[in-house]
């Protein structure tokens, strides 16, 4: 059994990220599994190395340990390109020349979160049209999705499903600036690292059907998924990376490691009261049944 935590270091980790890391860690360790850390800096310009290092330091400081050196997505373009080439050879991918303005046109249907569902304009280009457009514009590459409903049975939330053609549309595997898309990188990395359980925030649940479809095309197994509610502060506001007052440097000045772990465990429902706890105690007593399915809230204000 192999679990993992895969932060995007576009900002400092906040307590919500740390809670996610903690649940992934406790679940893996309580099953006697391994735990891996992957730095999701695939969007290289948005993820400076210093923030990746900060994330590693923060996790170490709370007592997390991993069983292999951290993987950096920014160093893995060759692996993603191989996967993309394979999908292209098999006819699942096409170049897309649409501009941002075309994609966000007022009449484009969207997923409900402002992300447009791609209408498929470039899916119908002839070989001649593609060759002509290639002369002036570097394309993105999109995966053609089927009119098919893909379901995930989430350990925590139960059934979640999407019809890929209707709810999502053909999605980007490589951007026109050459950077690889999150969906491809995540699927390739989890599979090649042998990850068998993915614990992550509820905000990524809707990416899971796309990832399962990619796993199928690439011949990878689908891991177990557990998406967890997003952590709120004591007033019920969602935490964000910009909240400097909940970064670990500030918190470590006021609280011990065990107090911070206890606070997180209490928010998740793993402890009945807010009290200090060691990682070992939390591993020994971890049980998914105790983890809250409704919003998780910090027990105190900062
Ligand atoms: N990198 C993503 C994030 O920090 C998580 C991706 C995942 O766990 O699959 O939100």
Image (tube, rainbow, N blue to C red):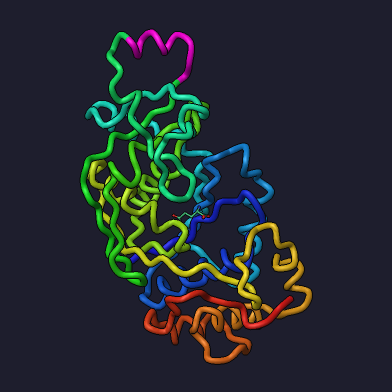
- Give the quadrant of the C terminus: bottom right
Residue 66 showing in the rendered view: yes
Q: Nearer the viewer, residue 93 or 32?
A: 93
Q: Is residue 294 above or below residue 188?
A: below
Image position, residue 241 (x, y; %) = 65, 58
| Magenta stretch: includes residue 94 | no
Asked which quadrant contains residue 142, the reply is top left
Residue 173 vs 195, above or below: the answer is: above
Where does the magenta region start and end?
129-138
**Percent position of residue 106, x then y:** 48, 34
Residue 64 is situated, as x and y percent measured from the top left of the image, at 55, 69
The residue sitting at 33% across, 29% down in the picture is 120
**x%, y% of residue 65?**
53, 67
**Magenta highlight: main SS:** helix
Q: Against 259, is 231 above or below?
A: above
Question: Residue at 49% across / 45% down in the picture?
Answer: 114
């Amino acid at each position: 059994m192999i679990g993992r935590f895969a932060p995007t270091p576009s900002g400092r980790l906040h307590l919500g990220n740390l809670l996610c890391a903690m649940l992934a860690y406790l679940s893996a360790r309580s099953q006697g599994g391994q735990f891996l850390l992957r730095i999701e800096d695939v969007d290289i310009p948005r993820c400076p190395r210093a923030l990746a290092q900060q994330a590693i330091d923060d996790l170490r400081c709370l007592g997390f340990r991993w069983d292999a050196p951290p993987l950096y997505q920014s160093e893995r373009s060759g692996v993603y390109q191989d996967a993309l080439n394979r999908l292209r050879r098999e006819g699942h991918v096409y170049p897309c020349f649409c501009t941002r303005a075309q994609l966000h046109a007022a009449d484009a249907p969207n997923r409900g979160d402002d992300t447009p569902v791609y209408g498929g304009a470039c899916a119908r280009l002839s070989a001649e049209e593609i060759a002509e457009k290639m002369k002036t514009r570097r394309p993105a590459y999109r995966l053609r999705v089927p009119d098919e409903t893909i379901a995930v049975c989430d350990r925590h939330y139960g059934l979640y499903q999407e019809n890929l053609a209707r709810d999502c549309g053909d999605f980007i595997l490589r951007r026109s600036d050459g950077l690889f898309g999150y969906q491809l990188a995540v699927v390739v990395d989890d599979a090649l690292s042998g990850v068998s359980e993915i614990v992550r925030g509820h905000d990524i649940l809707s990416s899971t059907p796309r990832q399962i479809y990619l796993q199928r095309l690439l011949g990878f197994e689908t891991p177990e998924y557990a998406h967890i509610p997003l952590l709120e502060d004591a007033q019920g506001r969602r935490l964000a990376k910009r909240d400097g007052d909940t970064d670990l440097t500030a918190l470590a000045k006021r609280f011990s490691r065990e107090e911070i772990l206890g606070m997180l465990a209490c928010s998740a429902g793993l402890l009945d009261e807010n009290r200090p706890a060691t990682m070992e105690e939390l591993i020994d007593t971890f049980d998914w049944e105790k983890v809250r399915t409704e919003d998780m809230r910090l027990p105190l204000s900062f």
